[in-house]
Amino acid sequence: MTNITTEITEGILTITINRESKMNALNIETLQEIKQAVIEGNENPEVVGMILTGAGTKAFAAGADISEFANFNVEKGTQMSADGHDVMNTIEDGHMHQWDGTKTKFVVAAVNGYALGGGCELAMACHMRIASSNAKFGQPEVNLGVPPGYGGTQRLIQLIGKGRALEMLLTGDAIDAQTALNYGLVTKVVDQAELLTVCREVVKKVASKSPSAVHKILKCVSDFYRPNVNGMQREIYEFGSAFSTEDFSEGTDAFLNKRKAEFKR
Protein backbone atom coordinates (compact mmCIF):
# COMPACT_ATOMS: atom_id res chain seq x y z
CA MET A 1 0.00 0.00 0.00
CA THR A 2 1.42 3.34 -1.05
CA ASN A 3 -0.99 5.89 0.44
CA ILE A 4 -1.48 4.56 3.96
CA THR A 5 0.59 2.94 6.66
CA THR A 6 -0.58 0.34 9.14
CA GLU A 7 0.77 -0.72 12.50
CA ILE A 8 -0.48 -3.16 15.12
CA THR A 9 0.51 -2.37 18.71
CA GLU A 10 -1.04 -4.22 21.67
CA GLY A 11 -3.72 -5.53 19.35
CA ILE A 12 -4.72 -2.07 18.09
CA LEU A 13 -4.47 -1.54 14.34
CA THR A 14 -3.61 2.08 13.52
CA ILE A 15 -4.34 3.05 9.92
CA THR A 16 -2.65 6.33 8.92
CA ILE A 17 -3.39 8.21 5.72
CA ASN A 18 0.14 8.96 4.58
CA ARG A 19 -0.25 11.85 2.13
CA GLU A 20 0.85 14.68 4.40
CA SER A 21 2.15 16.83 1.52
CA LYS A 22 -1.37 16.77 0.04
CA MET A 23 -3.12 17.32 3.38
CA ASN A 24 -3.99 13.62 3.30
CA ALA A 25 -6.48 14.18 0.47
CA LEU A 26 -8.52 11.10 -0.38
CA ASN A 27 -7.96 9.98 -3.92
CA ILE A 28 -9.69 6.84 -5.15
CA GLU A 29 -6.65 4.64 -4.56
CA THR A 30 -6.30 5.84 -0.95
CA LEU A 31 -9.94 5.04 -0.18
CA GLN A 32 -9.53 1.52 -1.54
CA GLU A 33 -6.41 1.01 0.55
CA ILE A 34 -8.30 2.14 3.65
CA LYS A 35 -11.10 -0.29 2.84
CA GLN A 36 -8.66 -3.18 2.42
CA ALA A 37 -6.88 -2.34 5.68
CA VAL A 38 -10.18 -2.29 7.58
CA ILE A 39 -11.24 -5.62 6.08
CA GLU A 40 -7.92 -7.17 7.07
CA GLY A 41 -8.27 -5.71 10.57
CA ASN A 42 -11.72 -7.23 10.94
CA GLU A 43 -10.45 -10.61 9.81
CA ASN A 44 -7.25 -10.59 11.90
CA PRO A 45 -7.87 -12.33 15.26
CA GLU A 46 -4.95 -10.42 16.78
CA VAL A 47 -6.69 -7.07 16.20
CA VAL A 48 -9.00 -5.92 19.01
CA GLY A 49 -9.89 -2.53 17.53
CA MET A 50 -8.76 0.11 15.08
CA ILE A 51 -7.72 3.77 14.96
CA LEU A 52 -7.95 5.78 11.75
CA THR A 53 -5.91 8.98 11.51
CA GLY A 54 -3.88 11.20 9.19
CA ALA A 55 -0.14 11.79 8.98
CA GLY A 56 1.23 14.99 10.50
CA THR A 57 -0.52 17.58 12.65
CA LYS A 58 -2.47 19.62 10.10
CA ALA A 59 -4.99 17.28 8.51
CA PHE A 60 -6.93 14.10 9.17
CA ALA A 61 -8.06 14.23 5.54
CA ALA A 62 -8.73 17.57 3.86
CA GLY A 63 -11.24 16.18 1.39
CA ALA A 64 -11.24 14.31 -1.87
CA ASP A 65 -8.51 14.86 -4.44
CA ILE A 66 -10.35 17.35 -6.69
CA SER A 67 -7.81 17.13 -9.49
CA GLU A 68 -8.68 13.47 -9.88
CA PHE A 69 -12.37 13.95 -10.68
CA ALA A 70 -12.55 17.47 -12.14
CA ASN A 71 -13.18 16.06 -15.63
CA PHE A 72 -15.46 13.16 -14.69
CA ASN A 73 -18.77 12.68 -16.50
CA VAL A 74 -22.06 11.58 -14.93
CA GLU A 75 -21.23 7.89 -15.17
CA LYS A 76 -17.81 8.23 -13.59
CA GLY A 77 -19.11 10.58 -10.91
CA THR A 78 -21.88 8.17 -9.97
CA GLN A 79 -19.43 5.27 -9.76
CA MET A 80 -17.05 7.35 -7.64
CA SER A 81 -19.83 8.06 -5.16
CA ALA A 82 -20.99 4.43 -5.07
CA ASP A 83 -17.44 3.20 -4.46
CA GLY A 84 -16.98 5.80 -1.72
CA HIS A 85 -20.19 4.69 -0.01
CA ASP A 86 -18.90 1.12 -0.11
CA VAL A 87 -15.72 2.17 1.70
CA MET A 88 -17.63 4.09 4.38
CA ASN A 89 -20.09 1.24 4.88
CA THR A 90 -17.22 -1.21 5.29
CA ILE A 91 -15.81 0.93 8.11
CA GLU A 92 -19.17 1.46 9.77
CA ASP A 93 -20.74 -1.95 9.55
CA GLY A 94 -18.75 -4.26 7.29
CA HIS A 95 -20.97 -7.15 6.32
CA MET A 96 -23.52 -6.46 9.01
CA HIS A 97 -26.39 -6.22 6.54
CA GLN A 98 -26.41 -9.99 7.01
CA TRP A 99 -27.84 -11.47 10.20
CA ASP A 100 -24.61 -13.38 10.62
CA GLY A 101 -21.39 -12.16 9.05
CA THR A 102 -17.84 -11.08 9.55
CA LYS A 103 -17.39 -9.49 12.96
CA THR A 104 -16.92 -5.76 12.63
CA LYS A 105 -14.50 -4.28 15.13
CA PHE A 106 -14.68 -0.94 16.86
CA VAL A 107 -13.09 1.90 14.87
CA VAL A 108 -12.27 5.32 16.32
CA ALA A 109 -11.26 8.31 14.21
CA ALA A 110 -8.34 10.27 15.66
CA VAL A 111 -9.07 13.57 13.95
CA ASN A 112 -5.75 15.39 14.06
CA GLY A 113 -6.60 18.49 12.00
CA TYR A 114 -8.77 19.32 9.01
CA ALA A 115 -11.56 16.84 8.26
CA LEU A 116 -13.27 18.37 5.26
CA GLY A 117 -15.52 16.91 2.59
CA GLY A 118 -14.61 13.27 2.15
CA GLY A 119 -12.42 13.56 5.24
CA CYS A 120 -15.40 14.55 7.37
CA GLU A 121 -17.41 11.73 5.82
CA LEU A 122 -14.59 9.29 6.59
CA ALA A 123 -14.53 10.38 10.22
CA MET A 124 -18.32 10.07 10.47
CA ALA A 125 -18.19 6.50 9.18
CA CYS A 126 -16.10 5.53 12.22
CA HIS A 127 -17.91 4.44 15.37
CA MET A 128 -16.47 7.29 17.44
CA ARG A 129 -14.58 10.50 16.77
CA ILE A 130 -11.98 12.06 19.08
CA ALA A 131 -10.47 15.35 17.93
CA SER A 132 -7.35 17.36 18.58
CA SER A 133 -7.96 20.95 19.63
CA ASN A 134 -6.92 22.23 16.19
CA ALA A 135 -9.37 20.02 14.28
CA LYS A 136 -11.94 21.50 11.92
CA PHE A 137 -14.91 19.77 10.32
CA GLY A 138 -16.83 20.75 7.22
CA GLN A 139 -18.68 19.69 4.09
CA PRO A 140 -17.70 22.38 1.56
CA GLU A 141 -18.81 20.45 -1.54
CA VAL A 142 -21.50 23.05 -2.28
CA ASN A 143 -18.67 25.37 -3.31
CA LEU A 144 -17.72 22.87 -6.05
CA GLY A 145 -21.23 22.55 -7.42
CA VAL A 146 -21.92 19.10 -5.97
CA PRO A 147 -23.47 17.66 -2.80
CA PRO A 148 -21.40 15.40 -0.54
CA GLY A 149 -20.96 12.02 -2.20
CA TYR A 150 -19.74 9.65 0.51
CA GLY A 151 -22.69 9.70 2.91
CA GLY A 152 -22.30 13.22 4.29
CA THR A 153 -25.91 14.26 3.73
CA GLN A 154 -27.08 11.29 5.77
CA ARG A 155 -24.56 10.75 8.57
CA LEU A 156 -24.21 14.44 9.44
CA ILE A 157 -27.96 14.69 10.07
CA GLN A 158 -27.85 11.53 12.16
CA LEU A 159 -25.05 12.88 14.32
CA ILE A 160 -25.88 16.57 14.81
CA GLY A 161 -29.50 17.00 13.73
CA LYS A 162 -31.20 18.39 10.64
CA GLY A 163 -30.91 22.11 11.34
CA ARG A 164 -27.22 22.19 12.16
CA ALA A 165 -26.42 19.73 9.40
CA LEU A 166 -28.24 21.80 6.79
CA GLU A 167 -26.38 24.91 7.93
CA MET A 168 -23.04 23.18 7.38
CA LEU A 169 -24.10 21.52 4.12
CA LEU A 170 -25.67 24.60 2.53
CA THR A 171 -23.12 27.19 3.60
CA GLY A 172 -20.03 25.02 3.31
CA ASP A 173 -18.77 26.59 6.54
CA ALA A 174 -16.43 24.59 8.77
CA ILE A 175 -16.75 24.25 12.55
CA ASP A 176 -13.94 24.03 15.08
CA ALA A 177 -13.30 21.19 17.49
CA GLN A 178 -15.14 22.75 20.44
CA THR A 179 -18.22 23.39 18.30
CA ALA A 180 -18.03 19.82 17.01
CA LEU A 181 -18.00 18.66 20.64
CA ASN A 182 -20.98 20.83 21.49
CA TYR A 183 -22.86 19.49 18.46
CA GLY A 184 -22.09 15.87 19.35
CA LEU A 185 -20.00 15.26 16.24
CA VAL A 186 -17.05 14.26 18.45
CA THR A 187 -16.99 12.80 21.94
CA LYS A 188 -13.72 14.31 23.19
CA VAL A 189 -11.34 17.15 22.36
CA VAL A 190 -7.75 16.74 23.52
CA ASP A 191 -4.34 18.26 22.87
CA GLN A 192 -2.67 17.10 19.68
CA ALA A 193 0.13 15.38 21.63
CA GLU A 194 -2.40 13.31 23.61
CA LEU A 195 -4.70 12.35 20.74
CA LEU A 196 -3.44 8.88 19.87
CA THR A 197 -2.90 7.98 23.52
CA VAL A 198 -6.49 8.87 24.39
CA CYS A 199 -7.78 6.96 21.36
CA ARG A 200 -5.78 3.89 22.35
CA GLU A 201 -7.24 4.05 25.86
CA VAL A 202 -10.76 4.12 24.44
CA VAL A 203 -10.08 1.19 22.11
CA LYS A 204 -8.53 -0.79 24.97
CA LYS A 205 -11.55 -0.13 27.16
CA VAL A 206 -13.97 -1.34 24.49
CA ALA A 207 -11.70 -4.32 23.80
CA SER A 208 -11.89 -5.34 27.46
CA LYS A 209 -15.63 -5.94 27.12
CA SER A 210 -17.39 -8.93 25.59
CA PRO A 211 -16.33 -9.11 21.91
CA SER A 212 -19.59 -10.75 20.88
CA ALA A 213 -21.68 -8.18 22.77
CA VAL A 214 -19.72 -5.29 21.24
CA HIS A 215 -20.34 -6.71 17.78
CA LYS A 216 -24.04 -7.19 18.49
CA ILE A 217 -24.37 -3.62 19.79
CA LEU A 218 -22.72 -2.25 16.64
CA LYS A 219 -25.13 -4.25 14.51
CA CYS A 220 -28.20 -3.06 16.42
CA VAL A 221 -27.14 0.58 16.37
CA SER A 222 -26.35 0.39 12.66
CA ASP A 223 -29.81 -0.97 11.93
CA PHE A 224 -31.45 2.05 13.58
CA TYR A 225 -30.39 4.03 10.51
CA ARG A 226 -30.86 1.32 7.89
CA PRO A 227 -34.00 1.69 5.74
CA ASN A 228 -36.43 -1.21 5.58
CA VAL A 229 -34.79 -2.96 8.54
CA ASN A 230 -36.53 -3.44 11.89
CA GLY A 231 -33.91 -2.48 14.48
CA MET A 232 -36.10 -3.63 17.36
CA GLN A 233 -36.37 -7.08 15.79
CA ARG A 234 -32.60 -7.10 15.32
CA GLU A 235 -32.16 -6.36 19.03
CA ILE A 236 -34.50 -9.21 20.01
CA TYR A 237 -32.53 -11.57 17.77
CA GLU A 238 -29.13 -10.43 19.02
CA PHE A 239 -30.16 -10.49 22.67
CA GLY A 240 -31.54 -14.01 22.40
CA SER A 241 -28.61 -15.37 20.43
CA ALA A 242 -26.21 -14.02 23.07
CA PHE A 243 -27.44 -16.66 25.53
CA SER A 244 -25.59 -19.35 23.55
CA THR A 245 -22.22 -17.58 23.71
CA GLU A 246 -19.22 -18.21 25.95
CA ASP A 247 -19.16 -14.49 26.65
CA PHE A 248 -22.60 -14.70 28.27
CA SER A 249 -21.54 -17.60 30.46
CA GLU A 250 -18.33 -15.80 31.49
CA GLY A 251 -19.98 -12.44 32.05
CA THR A 252 -22.83 -13.70 34.20
CA ASP A 253 -20.59 -16.06 36.19
CA ALA A 254 -18.13 -13.21 36.86
CA PHE A 255 -20.94 -10.94 38.02
CA LEU A 256 -22.52 -13.52 40.32
CA ASN A 257 -19.16 -14.44 41.83
CA LYS A 258 -18.02 -10.82 42.18
CA ARG A 259 -14.97 -11.11 39.97
CA LYS A 260 -13.77 -9.38 36.82
CA ALA A 261 -14.84 -11.06 33.61
CA GLU A 262 -12.11 -12.38 31.37
CA PHE A 263 -13.47 -12.65 27.86
CA LYS A 264 -11.71 -14.69 25.19
CA ARG A 265 -10.79 -12.89 22.02
Image (cartoon, rainbow, N blue to C red):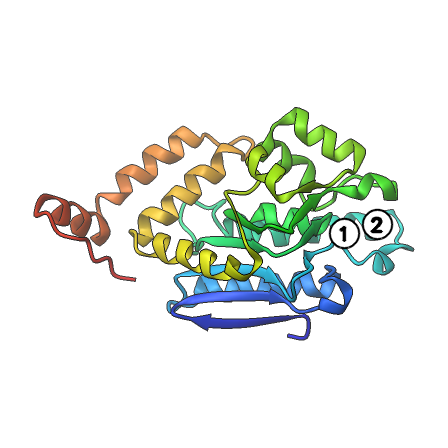
Name the residue: 64% across, 74% down. Answer: 1
Q: Are marks 1 and 2 in contact (CB under 8 Å)?
A: yes
Residue 8 placed where, x, y %? Answer: 46, 71
Residue 155 placed where, x, y %? Answer: 61, 38
Q: Which quadrant of the figure has residue 180?
A: top right
Residue 18 placed where, x, y %? Answer: 66, 69
Above or below, 157 relative to 193:
above
Residue 75 has which mark? 2
Q: Secondary structure at mark 1?
A: helix
- At label 1, which amino acid type do we have? Gln
Left or right of 12, for residue 61: right
Name the residue: 52% across, 62% down. Answer: 39
Above or below, 56 relative to 237:
below
Within-10-Å neighbours for mark 1: few <14, some 14–19, many 20+: few
Residue 98 placed where, x, y %? Answer: 46, 46
Residue located beneath label 1 in the image:
79
Above or below, 18 relative to 229:
below
- Toward the top, the furthest residue is 163
Name the residue: 66% across, 55% down. Answer: 113
- Toward the bottom, the furthest residue is 2
- Toward the right, the furthest residue is 71
Q: Nearer the viewer, residue 263 or 110?
A: 110
What is the total number of numbered labels drawn onto the structure image? 2
Instruction: Report the Cα–Cα distance between label 1 and label 2.
Output: 6 Å
Left or right of 68, for residue 155: left
- At label 2, which amino acid type do we have? Glu
